[in-house]
Image (tube, helix red, strand yellow):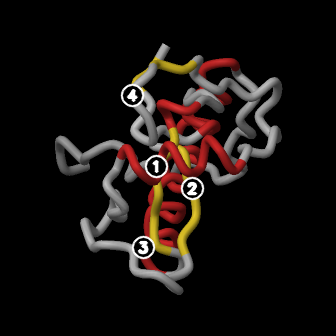
Amino acid sequence: MIDNPLGGRQVEEWIGKTADSAVPDRVKDRVFMRFQGRCHRTGLKIQAGDKWELEHLKALGLGGENRERNLAPILAGDPHKEKTAEEVGMMRKADRMRRKHNGTWPKSKAKLQGRGFAKTRDI
């Protein structure tokens, strides 16, 4: 149960059945009101006519859930692109680390070249 910012009563939290489940408009309204109409990334007030989107606070690819408490409004354009770019970098690193741990990361084909032994005496 979560507090409904649009009214005084508590409502069931929306949880998507899958990661691709579309967020209903009633949930978008509640999330927008919970953040008082501000972009969670920049803190700017979202004005009428501004394009904004809902995004996951913790990306699904990083273990986040597709549920109401993991959603926040963000201005479309640069703020959303910047956050997505950061998350993509983190997801790629996590993927590399997991694959190296599992032994499925391809081995390097480059041979290591040593400098040989140091000469210790004159012949």
Q: Nearer the viewer, mark 1 or mark 3?
A: 1
Residue that badge 2 annotates: 54
Could you give the CA–CA distance between mark 2 and mark 1, rounded to whole angstroms?
5 Å
Q: Give neighbour class at mark 1: few <14, some 14-19, many 20+ (Cα, 10 Å).
A: many
In 3D space, how far apart are the residues under numbered discs 2 and 3 (Cα atoms)? 12 Å
Q: x, y percentage for residue 92? A: 59, 48
Which image quadrant is residue 43 in? bottom left
Q: Earlier in the sequence, mark 1 or mark 3?
A: 1
Q: Could you tell me which residue is drawn at 61 percent across and 41 percent down?
A: 27
Q: Name the kind of residue labelled 3 in the image.
A: Pro
For the residue carrying disc 4, how many other residues have a C-alpha within 10 Å: few (<14), some (14-19), or many (20+)? Answer: few
Depth check: 27 or 5 in front?
5
Q: CA distance from mark 1 to mark 4?
A: 21 Å
Foreground mark, 3 or 4, reads: 4
Q: What is the crowding at mark 2: few (fewer than 14 residues within 10 Å), some, or many (at least 20)?
A: some
Residue occupied by mark 4 = 8
Looking at the rendered structure, the kind of residue marked 4 is Gly
Q: Nearer the viewer, residue 111 or 38?
A: 38
Q: For mark 1, give the secondary structure.
A: strand
Q: Which residue is mark 1?
A: 72
Mark 1 or mark 4: whose residue is earlier in sequence: 4
Q: Using residue 47 as the reference point, say whether residue 43 is left or right of it.
A: left
Dividing the picture into quadrants, the one containing residue 53 is: bottom right
> Which type of secondary structure does the marked residue at label 3 adopt?
helix
Answer with left or right where residue 20 lies relative to residue 60. Answer: right
Q: Which residue is mark 3?
A: 79
